Image (cartoon, grey):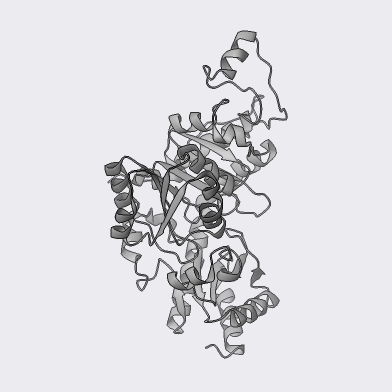
Amino acid sequence: MKKNDPASRIQDLRQFGEFGGVNPSITDSSTYTFLEADTMVDTFHGETQGCFLYSRHWNPSNKYLADALAALDETEAGWVTASGMAAITCSLLELCNSGDHIVTSVTTYGGTFAFLKNYLPKFNIDVSFVNIADLESVEKAIRPNTRLIYTESLTNPLLQVSDIPVLSDLCKTNGIKLIVDNTFTPMIVSPARLGADIVVYSMTKFINGKNDCVAGAICSSVDFINALSDVNAGSAMLLGPVLDPLRSSSILKNLHTLHIRMKQHSRNAMFIAERFLDLGLKVIYPGLESHPHHTLMKEIMNPEFGFGGMFTLDLGDHETSYKFMQAMQEKDIGYLAVSLGYFKTLFSCSGHSTSSEVPEDIQKEIGLSDGLTRFSIGLDNDIERTCEKMISCLKEMNIV
C-alpha cells in the first residue's frame, strides 16, 4: 500500500501572495467588487461558484486555509469556521431535518454531547448514544430515519479508537453519512481515506498549536461544501460562523509545522505513558499494548506520526486529581487548563471540566471515573526531566 503522507500534500501546495510574497496575502475586506452586475446576481442565485461575494460566504484567506486542510485530509474541498463547535453543528444541521435520527458515540467531547442531547431535540432530531467500539450496538441503533453516524477518531476523554473503515461500510450499506471528528489525531489518522464522508476539526487544538485563537474546519466533498456555503440554504452561510482572515493566515503558517509537532507530542506522550504504566498506574494511551484498541489503532494510523499527544491517568477521585494537577503546575510542568494541543502540557479532570456536560450517571456507565485526569503532553525537549518532575509529585502524594 502506498504510504499516506499528509505532510507532503501540504508541502506541495503552491500558495503565495498577490505581489509574490511567499505567504499568501491577508484579505482585509468584508465585501468584494464584481466587474459585471450579472455575475453578482448569478452568485446570489447560487449559479456561480468560486466568486468572492462577502466574507461570511468566502474570502481568499479562508480559501487558502480550506484548500490546505483539504490537502491534509485528501478531500475534494474544505471550509473553515470560527470554532470547532461551529464545524460540528453546521455539519450536523446541514444533513439533518426535523424527524431525522443520529447515531453517535456516547463517549464524546462534552460540548458535542450537550448539542446532541440537549439542543437538537428543539428541532425534533432524535439521537441514540452508543458504545462506538461495540459495532453490533451501532448497527442495531440504525433506524429507517437515521441520517448519519457521528464519532471521534480517538474519543474524548476515554481514548477509544473508532473503527472508521467498518463504520464507513455500515454507513454505505444503510445509505447514510459518516462524520468523524479528528481533532485529537490530525495527520495520525486520515478519516476520509478510511471512508469518512465528512471530517471535522477544532483547529484551536493541535492544528494551530498555540492556543491563541478558536477555529474549526470541515473537510468533505465539493458537493457538501457547496451545500454548506449556499447563499440561500447553506447552514454555514446562514448561521454565519465565519473565521477572521487574519486568524486564517496565522493558522495556515502553523499548519506547515504540524507534522513536526505531532511527532514530538507523540514521542513525549509515549515516554510518559510507558513510565507511568511501569509504576503500576492506571494509564490509557493507544500506543500501549495494554490499550484495548492498540491493534486497531496500528491498522488505521499513519505510523510515522506516532499515537498522539493525549493520554489519561485515573487517580480515583477528583480531590486527588486536583492536588496532583496543582502540584504539577507549581513545579512548572504545565498548566491546569482545558483544551489541548499546546506546546506546554495541559491537564484537567475530565468529568469536572470538558466532560462536565455529560450527566454523572452516564459518566459512571461509560467508565469515566471521578478522578480521570486528561493530559495533553507538550513539546518538551527533555521529556525525561519532565517525567521525573511528574513522578516526584506522585511520590509526594504517596500515589507511587
Q: How far across and down, in percent of the image, does residue 77 sit?
A: 47, 33
Residue sticking out furthest to the bottom: 398
Task: Please give left or right for residue 127 compared with residue 195 in the image.
Answer: right
Label tally:
0
Whether residue 247 appears in this view of the structure is yes
Q: How far across and down, in percent of the image, does residue 207 sit?
A: 56, 50
- Closer to us: 143 or 134: 143
- Closer to us: 275 or 348: 348
Looking at the rendering, which quadrant does residue 57 occupy? top right
Q: How far across and down, in percent of the image, does residue 230 sit?
A: 54, 27
- Closer to us: 30 or 47: 47
The residue lying at 29 percent from left, 48 percent from top is 170
Q: How far across and down, in percent of the image, does residue 301 sit?
A: 37, 55
| Whether residue 205 is situated above or below residue 250 in the rendered picture | below
The residue lying at 33 percent from left, 48 percent from top is 143
Task: Please give left or right for residue 346 compared with residue 166 in the image.
Answer: right
| Whether residue 213 is situated above or below residue 47 in the rendered picture | below
Whether residue 11 appears in this view of the structure is no
The residue lying at 38 percent from left, 53 percent from top is 302
| Whether residue 48 is situated above or below residue 100 in the rendered picture | above
- Closer to us: 320 or 210: 320
